[in-house]
Image (tube, helix red, strand yellow):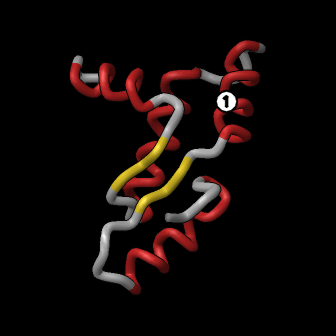
Amino acid sequence: MVKPGLPYLDVLAEVRASVDVPVWTYQVSGEYSMVEAAAANGWLDRRATILDSLTAFRRAGADTILSYWAVEAARWIREGL
């Protein structure tokens, strides 16, 4: 598991390239709080930012992403974004 996720996307990619086991990443509470606070102030698009961060984890090589937004993001994906 790579934790925290966003600041260590490069580490996540290196781990993925180095091992043949599932690689997990965790979107820590600070990342969650940062996005929620910025969205509440109207500084960014909450949904787009959440999906961008999850996509970044996947592109870096995460097989599984632990996120506070897991249920919400799964619903968006199921509904076709």
Q: Secondary structure at mark 1?
A: helix
Between residues 68 and 46, which one lies in front from this camera angle?
68
Q: Given the image, on which type of amino acid does mark 1 rest? A: Val
Q: How many marks?
A: 1
Judged left or right of residue 6, residue 42 is right
Position of residue 43 relative to residue 49, above or below, is above
On screen, residue 10 versus residue 19, left or right, reads: right
- The residue shown at (58%, 21%) is 45
Q: Residue at x 73, y 40 (%)?
A: 30
Res. 9 image quadrant: bottom right
Indicate left or right for 5 with 66 as reference.
right
Q: Is residue 68 above or below residue 75?
A: below
Where is residue 73? Give x, y as percent: 39, 27
The furthest residue to the bottom: 18
Residue at point 77% right, 14% down? 41
Q: Nearer the viewer, residue 61 or 71?
A: 71
Q: Which quarter of the figure has residue 38?
A: top right
Task: Specify the quadrant that holds the C terminus.
Answer: top left
48 left or right of 58 in image: right
Q: Residues within 10 Å of mark 1 (few under 14, many from 20)?
A: many
**Residue 23 horizontal/vertical position (percent):** 39, 66
Image: 52 above or below 43: below
Residue 72 percent coordinates (x, y): 41, 21
Q: Quadrant of residue 2?
A: bottom right
**Residue assigned mark 1:** 35
